[in-house]
């Protein structure tokens, strides 16, 4: 094994799973810029599967935010302070990640100005949502890339993100696990979302399944808490409810080879981008201009065709429609979704 004597680099992203998946692209770009530097990645417990095992990440540090949150954080800080990091890149904009950054021993600390402890950074970059730049609204991958550019001014924020999609540590074992479900042309549906207003209506997903099931093998995915929803969406069709049965990486492996993946503005959307699956992304309360849209080669975004003065109603969506009509979801018809399968 070749040993590296370059000083290590720390990347911090302790947000939700979708943000962590997107941060894998940043980790790969940092490795490309500093190939001899061992990469350390700090993330929240539950997200480690999408980073641990990547060939360019040497160490994964896990923060358990549910059990002894503060004690766990201080333990990690003490552990990480043992390293003399060349750079610390903080992709997160909340206090706790700023505290970790501020207390690190590092040559340079880089992060977003919106973090309340960004005064302790050597380089502060504006995180703008939406970020209007060359080529239109920037993706989160491009916003993150600015942090790398701060220490490598010779680099240019990419406009073509083909080579900057998120990456996953998929293995042959993941693919073998899902292979029995790929015995016929199939589509994958991920109908759930943490936020109600980010989720296309259940009745619409159920009708979509009814229309697709005679033509394709329909596979429904989600976490254990999504199983009941997927069972209702399945209805009387012969769709297969896999919610709660597959890991995140197995779900991504399932998307490989799909005729199409239908998904909300949520974590599974970024899994689809990572494996470059043909994707239909349904944006209800949120908009792709926020910078979290699909990155697959064949990606179609569906939105309400009717302009709504109330949309977007928030950055992350909400538990109820504040206007009471939920037109941003209702106006996306099943026929619009079905038509994306006919697109060459």
Image (spheres, rainbow, N blue to C red):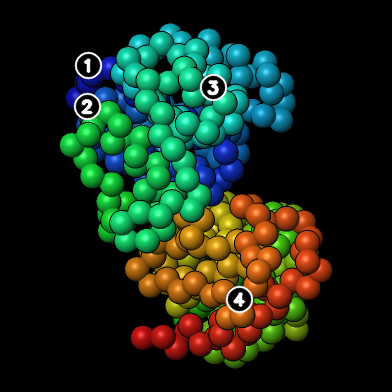
Q: Earlier in the sequence, mark 2 or mark 4?
A: 2
Residue wearing tag 4: 307
Q: Is residue 33 visible?
A: yes
Identify which residue is drawn at 38% across, 72% down.
Answer: 298
In the rendered structure, are the residues bearing label 1 and label 4 in contact, judged by CB atoms less than 8 Å apart? no
**Residue 38, position in %: x, y?**
31, 25
Q: Earlier in the sequence, mark 3 or mark 1?
A: 1
**Residue 175, position in %: x, y?**
44, 59
Alpha carbons under labels 2 and 4: distance apart: 50 Å
Alpha carbons under labels 3 and 1: distance apart: 31 Å
Categorize mark 3 by other alpha carbons within 10 Å: few (<14), some (14-19), many (20+).
Answer: many
Categorize mark 1 by other alpha carbons within 10 Å: few (<14), some (14-19), many (20+).
Answer: few
Residue in the foreground of this view, choosing between 147 and 41: 147
Q: Is residue 280 left or right of residue 219?
A: left
Q: Earlier in the sequence, mark 2 or mark 3?
A: 2
Residue wearing tag 2: 36
Secondary structure category for the residue under label 2: loop
Secondary structure category for the residue under label 1: loop
Alpha carbons under labels 1 and 2: distance apart: 7 Å
Identify which residue is drawn at 54% across, 89% down.
Answer: 215
In the rendered structure, are the residues bearing label 3 and label 4 in contact, judged by CB atoms less than 8 Å apart? no
């Amino acid at each position: 094994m070749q040993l590296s004597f370059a000083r290590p680099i720390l990347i911090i992203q302790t947000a939700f799973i979708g943000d962590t998946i997107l941060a894998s692209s940043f980790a790969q770009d940092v490795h490309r810029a500093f190939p001899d530097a061992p990469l350390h990645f700090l993330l929240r417990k539950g997200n480690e599967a999408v980073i641990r095992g990547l060939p360019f990440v040497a160490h994964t540090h896990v923060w358990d935010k549910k059990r002894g949150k503060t004690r766990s954080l201080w333990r990690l800080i003490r552990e990480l302070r043992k390293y003399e990091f060349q750079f610390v890149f903080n992709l997160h904009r909340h206090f706790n990640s700023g505290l970790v950054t501020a207390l690190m021993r590092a040559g340079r600390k880089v992060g977003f100005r919106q973090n309340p402890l960004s005064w302790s950074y050597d380089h502060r970059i504006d995180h703008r949502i939406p970020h209007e730049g060359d080529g239109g609204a920037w993706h989160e991958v491009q916003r993150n890339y600015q942090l790398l550019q701060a220490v490598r001014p010779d680099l240019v924020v990419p406009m073509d993100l083909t080579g900057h999609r998120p990456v996953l540590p998929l293995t042959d074992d993941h693919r073998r696990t899902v292979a029995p479900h790929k015995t016929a042309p199939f589509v994958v549906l991920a109908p759930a979302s943490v936020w109600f207003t980010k989720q296309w209506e259940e009745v619409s997903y159920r009708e979509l399944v009814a229309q697709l099931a005679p033509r394709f093998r329909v596979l429904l995915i989600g976490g254990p808490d999504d199983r009941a929803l997927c069972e209702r969406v399945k209805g009387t069709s012969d769709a297969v409810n896999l919610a709660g049965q597959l890991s995140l990486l197995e779900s991504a492996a399932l998307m490989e080879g799909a005729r199409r993946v239908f998904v909300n503005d949520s974590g599974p959307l970024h899994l689809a981008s990572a494996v470059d699956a043909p994707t239909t992304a349904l944006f209800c309360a949120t908009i792709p201009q926020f910078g979290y849209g699909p990155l697959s080669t064949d990606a179609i975004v569906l939105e309400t065709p009717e302009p709504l003065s109330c949309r977007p109603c928030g950055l992350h969506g909400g538990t109820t429609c504040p206007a009471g009509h939920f037109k941003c979801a209702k106006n996306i018809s099943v026929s619009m979704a079905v038509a994306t399968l006919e697109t060459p």
